[in-house]
Image (tube, rainbow, N blue to C red):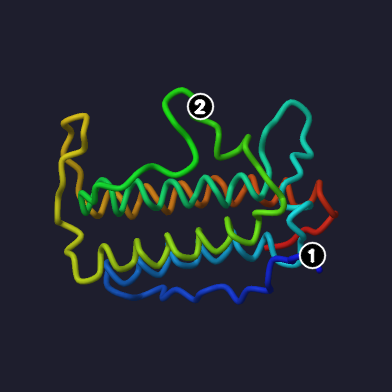
Amino acid sequence: MMWTAPEVTRAGASLVAPEPEMLRGLLDWHRSTLLYKCAGLTGEQLALAPIARSNLSLLGLIRHMSKVERIWFRQFFRGEPIARLYSTPERPDADFEDLDPARAEADYARLLEEQELARQAVDGASLDATFVRPDGDTYSLRLVFNHMIAEYARHNGHADLVRQCVDGVTGA
């Protein structure tokens, strides 16, 4: 039996919450939106890169966001000594290029896991908390939340286009 991405109910976000709750809610909404765009597709469909001269696929976006969640929240903010997912300096687009439809379920589960580990990494932390990236620049957790919301928003737009090319489905 072929795996199919499950149906998703998108997270709600408060429009009047204090900033920490609002940013966490907006990020969770964007996280669930990417999964929503994948719902009902098989691993084969998720791995399709249907746009000429582009390596964009929904599975690539799933893998990419797993990598980004891990980098920003666990490696940079928490300083966890863990390996990067999927790509290397020599192969920066491996998260988009080394796709295996048979591993789509595992890649999807990895994204869910990285999202939860990211939530745990910042649980109780102030948005004013800072960290120093390996490049020497100091960042705040507030900037990370804003960066991640923008990252998901950009890639959710890509997901809209890719999904429409895969099976014609459109929508919010």
4 sits left or right of 115 in the view: right
Asked which secondary structure carries label 2, the reply is loop
- Residue at image position (71%, 54%) is 102
Q: Is residue 59 above or below residue 19?
A: above
Front one among 30 and 59 = 59
8 sits left or right of 79 in the view: right
Front one among 15 and 1 = 1
- Residue at image position (14%, 56%) is 129
Please identify the quarter of the rendering in which residue 23 is found.
Answer: bottom left
Looking at numbered disc 2 in the image, what kind of residue is underneath it?
Arg
Q: Is residue 90 above or below residue 103?
A: above
- Residue at image position (55%, 64%) is 109
Residue at the spot of label 1: 2
The crowd level at tag 1 (other Cα within 10 Å; few <14, some 14-19, many 20+) is: few
Measure how far apart labels 2 and 1 are at the Cα level: 29 Å
Residue at the spot of label 2: 91
The answer to whether the residues at label 2 and label 1 have Cβ atoms under 8 Å apart is no
43 sits left or right of 108 in the view: right
Front one among 89 and 118 = 89
- Residue at image position (35%, 64%) is 117
Which quarter of the rendered picture does the N terminus lie within? bottom right
| Number of numbered labels in the structure image | 2
Please identify the quarter of the rendering in which residue 42 is found.
Answer: bottom right
Asked which secondary structure carries label 1, the reply is loop
Q: Is residue 89 above or below residue 162?
A: above
Residue 30 visible to an observer of this rendering: no
* Residue 32 x, y percent position in the rendering: 54, 66
* Residue 79 x, y percent position in the rendering: 20, 49
